[in-house]
Image (cartoon, rainbow, N blue to C red):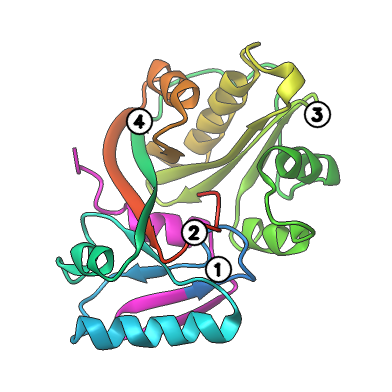
């Protein structure tokens, strides 16, 4: 199923950690523990002695008071890294699907507004659905606004974020208020973002969704997205949540 080798790079660019250290081709990202995406090792190149490199990564995150987390996909280097981490006691966490679709000629989602910056209402709704980090919304906002993006909102009940990345549009931060679910609002936000992405010159869209979130996966498939890859995290403890 691995037909999307760019996923690691694109996700790292669209969900940028405020601080990143390059350690022999491994990117050590951190953002005060807010989301595993922004607080994990992205192993893009072979650093040499894998045991020594893992030791260094563990020391780096220990100094920050964070667990050591690795983002692992088919492009992770070296190839034996996932097995090495498993043998070292790292748990496999959050298998996550990468899904892709061609941008269709669709009308903009009815009633959906897209802004250049997230409003307080946008942030509050997204955080009420996806916020799992105590009082760390300022850091989350810093991550969200670290690159140019469009912030879609539908009546204060559903939101989403689109990130133009050349030919690709990344779809992130999709959230619907619990009392407004199963009314097609998320679908309308998604369609609006895809139409907006086409206006930005994008040709294809991608998104990442935790594999166990069957309702979201079904909705994305109904909207033309296909499974194109999968990644997971290796975590030395099980206290960190979210994608």
Residue located 60% across and 50% down the image = 149
Q: Is residue 144 magenta?
A: no
Inter-mark Cα distance, 2 to 4: 22 Å
Residue 17 is tagged as 1
Question: Which mark is in front, 4 or 3?
Answer: 3
Disc with the residue nearer the chain's start (2 vs 4)? 2
Residue 230 is tagged as none
What's the magenta region? Answer: 1-28
Looking at the image, do the residues carrying marks 1 and 3 touch, with CB atoms under 8 Å apart? no
Question: Which mark is in front, 4 or 1?
Answer: 1
Q: Secondary structure at mark 3?
A: loop
Is residue 111 visible in the rendered image? The answer is no
Disc with the residue nearer the chain's start (3 vs 2)? 2
Inter-mark Cα distance, 4 to 3: 27 Å
Q: Is residue 206 left or right of residue 86?
A: right
The number of discs equals 4
């Amino acid at each position: 199923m691995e037909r999307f080798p760019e996923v690691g790079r694109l996700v790292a660019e669209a969900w940028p950690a405020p601080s990143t250290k390059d350690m022999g081709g491994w990117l050590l990202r951190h953002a005060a523990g807010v989301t595993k995406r922004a607080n994990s090792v992205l192993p893009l190149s072979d650093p040499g002695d894998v045991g020594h490199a893992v030791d260094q990564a563990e020391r780096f995150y220990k100094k920050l008071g964070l667990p050591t987390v690795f983002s692992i996909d088919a492009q992770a280097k070296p190839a034996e890294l996932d097995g090495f981490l498993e043998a070292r006691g790292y748990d496999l966490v959050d298998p996550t699907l990468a899904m892709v679709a061609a941008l269709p000629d669709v009308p903009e989602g009815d009633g959906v507004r897209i802004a250049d910056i997230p409003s307080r209402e946008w942030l509050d709704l997204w955080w009420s659905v996806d916020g799992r980090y105590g009082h760390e919304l300022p850091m989350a906002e810093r991550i969200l606004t670290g690159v140019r993006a469009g912030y879609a909102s539908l009546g204060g009940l559903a939101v989403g974020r689109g990130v133009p990345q050349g030919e690709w549009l990344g779809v992130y931060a999709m959230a619907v208020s619990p009392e407004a679910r199963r009314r097609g609002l998320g679908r309308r936000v998604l369609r609006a973002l895809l139409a907006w992405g086409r206006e930005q010159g994008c040709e294809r869209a991608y998104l990442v969704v935790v594999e166990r979130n069957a309702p979201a996966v079904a909705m994305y498939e109904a909207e033309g997205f296909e499974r194109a890859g999968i990644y997971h995290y290796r975590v030395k403890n099980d206290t960190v949540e979210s994608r």
